[in-house]
Amino acid sequence: MRQVLPLLAALLVAQPLPALAQETPAATTTFRIDKARLDRALADMVASGRATGVEALVWKDGREAYYGSTGLADREANRPMRRDTLVQVYSMTKPVTGVSLMQLWEQGKFGLDDPLARYLPEFATMLVRDGTDAAGAPIWRPSKRPVTIRDVLRHTAGFAYGGGDSAAEKAFAAADPLGLDHDLTEFGHRLAHLPLIFDPGSEWRYSSAVDVQALLVEKLSGQPFEDYARQHVLAPLGIKEAGWSQPMDRLDRFAATYILGADGKLTREPDAVTRARNFPKPAMTMGGAGIVAPIDDYMRFARMLLGQGTLDGVRILKPATVRLMATNALDPRITEKSWLPSKGNVGFGIDFAVRIGQPKTPEENRGAVGEFFWDGAASTLFWVDPANRLAAVFFVQTKPFQATLHRDFRRAVYGAAYLGPSGD
C-alpha cells in the first residue's frame, strides 16, 4: 500500500481532470495566425466568384493579429473593399440588442422567467394551432403556458418570422409586423395578435423574438431603442459609426450587396433594397437587423465580449452576465431545433450560438469548445473564442447566405488540422 499511494498521487498530477466545456473551455490544438494563409483564403473567395469583396479582422492575445481585404465593395463603381467600408451586418445586430436588454436585467428591471405579458400585456393570450376543422381551416387553442422572457432570449417563444408554409408563418407574412413604416410599438401590437408556431419552450426556432427584445428595451428603459443602444452600449465602447441611423454623407462608403445566382454569377441587389434600412432610416428600428458598421467598430463590440463585458476600462456587462449569454440555454428536451444544427456542434444561449463540443465532421466549421458567435444574412460573421483569447470579424455582402465562406475563413484562422483530422 505504501508503494501504491505515491504511484496514485503521481498519476493524479500527471492526468488533470478534463475541463468543463461551458465553464473552462480549453483549446485542443495550438495554432498561430498565418497571414499568408488568410490572404490566400480571402483572395480565393473573390476569385471563385462567391463575393465581389471581403475583409477580415482577427484579434488575439490582446492585440490585432490580422487585417486583410480584397476585391470590391461596389463593383459597378470600381470601389475597393477598405477598412472604412460600411456593411449591413443584418442579424449580427441581434447580439447588440441582447447586450442592451441584459444591462436592464442586471439592474433588476425584469426576471428571466417572468411572463412577457407582465411588461407587454398585449402578449397575455397567445394561440397555437390545434389541428384543422372539417373545411381544412386551422383550429386554434391557447398556448400551454405563457411566453417568458427567457423564451424571447433563446428563440423558444414560438414566434414566427415570415418564412414557411405554416398557418402561423402565413399570418405573420400577411400582417407584416416588421414593415419598415412601423415603429416597434406597432410591431408589438401586430405580433401579439398573431398565433405562435408551437407552444413556448417546446422547440428552438429563429424568429422575431429579438425585435421583441428591442421593444422590451424601450418599455423598461423609457427610451427609444436606438437611443438606448447608442447611449449605453455603442458610444461607451468608442463605437463612432455603427448604428441604424446613418447620415447620407456616408453613403459613398456603403458596400453594395450581390446575389449569387444558380448560374454562379453575382448580380447587384437593387440599391433601394440594400439601403432601405438606413439611407435614410425608416420608422422601424429592428432588434434583429439593421446595424451598418465598419469592421473596426464591430470588433470593438466583439472585444468587449472577449473581455467579459469590459473594453479599455469601460464595463458594459458583468462577467457573469457574459458567461450566461454564452452558455447553452436549451433544455435537453428541446430536440426540434430547425436549422440550428447546420451551425455545427452547438447549442444556443442568449442571442449567440454556443459551441458545446468539438466538430463532429471534417466539413464542420473550425472552432473551440466554449466559443460563441452569430452571423448575418449577407454572409457576415463574428465569433469570440475565450479558450484562444481570440475574436474574429468577417465582412462580405453576398446573398443568399454562403456557409462555405465561413468554413474557409475559419480554416484559414485555425489551420486545417485544428480540431479536425490531420491533413483535412
Image (cartoon, rainbow, N blue to C red):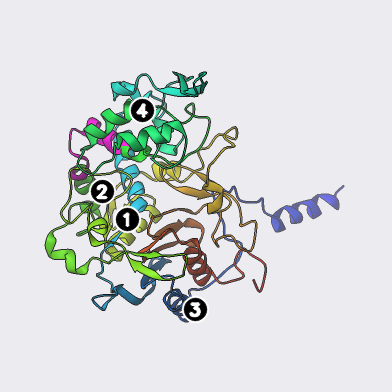
Describe residue 152's horizontal placement relative to residue 292 as left or right: right
Describe residue 197's horizontal placement relative to residue 298 as left or right: right
How far is mark 2 from mark 4, CA to CA?
A: 32 Å
Q: Secondary structure at mark 4?
A: loop
Q: Against 98, is 259 above or below?
A: below
* Image quadrant assignment for residue 232: top left
Q: Position of residue 363 (x, y in %)?
A: 60, 63
Q: Write down the residue under mark 1.
A: 301
Q: Secondary structure at mark 1?
A: helix
Q: Write down the residue under mark 4.
A: 194
Q: Please say whether residue 23 is visible from this viewpoint.
A: no
Most frequent secondary structure within the magenta stretch:
helix
- The residue drawn where x is 36% and y is 53% is 92
Mark 4 residue type: Leu
Marks 1,2: beta carbons within 8 A: yes
Magenta-tinted stretch: 212-227
How far is mark 1 from mark 4, CA to CA?
A: 34 Å
Badge 2 crowding class, 10 Å Cα cut-off, few under 14, some 14 to 19, many 20 or more, is many
Give the mark nearer the N terminus: 2 vs 4.
4
Q: Against 233, is 379 above or below?
A: below
